[in-house]
Amino acid sequence: KNQVEQSPQSLIILEGKNCTLQCNYTVSPFSNLRWYKQDTGRGPVSLTIMTFSENTKSNGRYTATLDADTKQSSLHITASQLSDSASYICVVIKTGTASKLTFGTGTRLQVTL
Amino acid sequence: NAGVMQNPRHLVRRRGQEARLRCSPMKGHSHVYWYRQLPEEGLKFMVYLQKENIIDESGMPKERFSAEFPKEGPSILRIQQVVRGDSAAYFCASSVDRSDIQYFGAGTRLSVL
């Protein structure tokens, strides 16, 4: 079983709408959690980083939340744009292994007109 | 400041040949990481290097795979005697230090015929 599970697997929304992506993890002990955006054929790009003590972090239209007690995180995208079409990957870093990222399989988002 | 540069972008090899994947980190970054992404799967950590040293190779297959990061020049991921199962996208990332954000290259897509 993957240590980082994401849902939904894929999602299609209309331009201008909001959406929320979910991430559940079992990695322990937990150091920090990151959301990455990966465009087709490109490498992942960091969107947000949250440590154990942070509950929310925003980056423009992206807002990530973290509940370390339930080991859940979400990424909320506001007023979606066509350029938001990409895979969104939840990444968890285990304490003491700062170099080794554990990736979820991602949510594939498609924004349409 | 150019980002992480990987080449080639696409590499085709026949079974039994060698594959060499190159990664030039961002300027000022001395930490390099290699990840592999199989189709429809998340990225998996392979190896972490810091100039001339392998720090963590726990994700590297025991045979046929090797990595180096010489004092001068790019980091090299070398796959000897490739097999069809080696077909994947190989991503390189770099960071200033081990706890910093990892910046990813665009990846090398290896196809083994």
Image: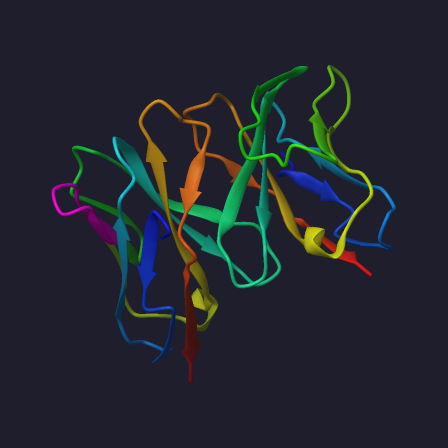
**Picture coordinates of residue B66, whole percent (x, y):** 71, 30
- Quarter holding the C terminus of chain B is bottom right
Quadrant of residue A41 in the image? Answer: bottom right
Q: Residue at x 34, y 47 (%)?
A: A3
Farthest left residue? A69
Q: Is residue B9 left or right of residue A21?
A: right
Farthest front residue? B63
Quadrant of residue B64 in the image? Answer: top right
**Picture coordinates of residue B13, whole percent (x, y):** 85, 53
Q: Residue at x 47, y 67 (%)?
A: A83
Residue B92 located within the stretch drawn in magenta? no
Give the residues drawn in magenta, as a range.
A63-73
B67 to A71, vertically: above or below: above
- Quarter holding the N terminus of chain B is top right
Residue A72 located within the stretch drawn in magenta? yes
**Picture coordinates of residue A36, whole percent (x, y):** 42, 50
Name the dominant secondary structure of the magenta segment.
strand
B79 to A12, vertically: above or below: above
Q: Is residue B32 left or right of residue B75?
A: left
**Picture coordinates of residue B26, whole percent (x, y):** 62, 31
Farthest bottom residue? A113
Q: Residue at x 43, y 57 (%)?
A: A105
Q: Is residue A32 left or right of residue B57?
A: left
Q: Residue at x 37, y 51 (%)?
A: A2
B68 to A90, vertically: above or below: above
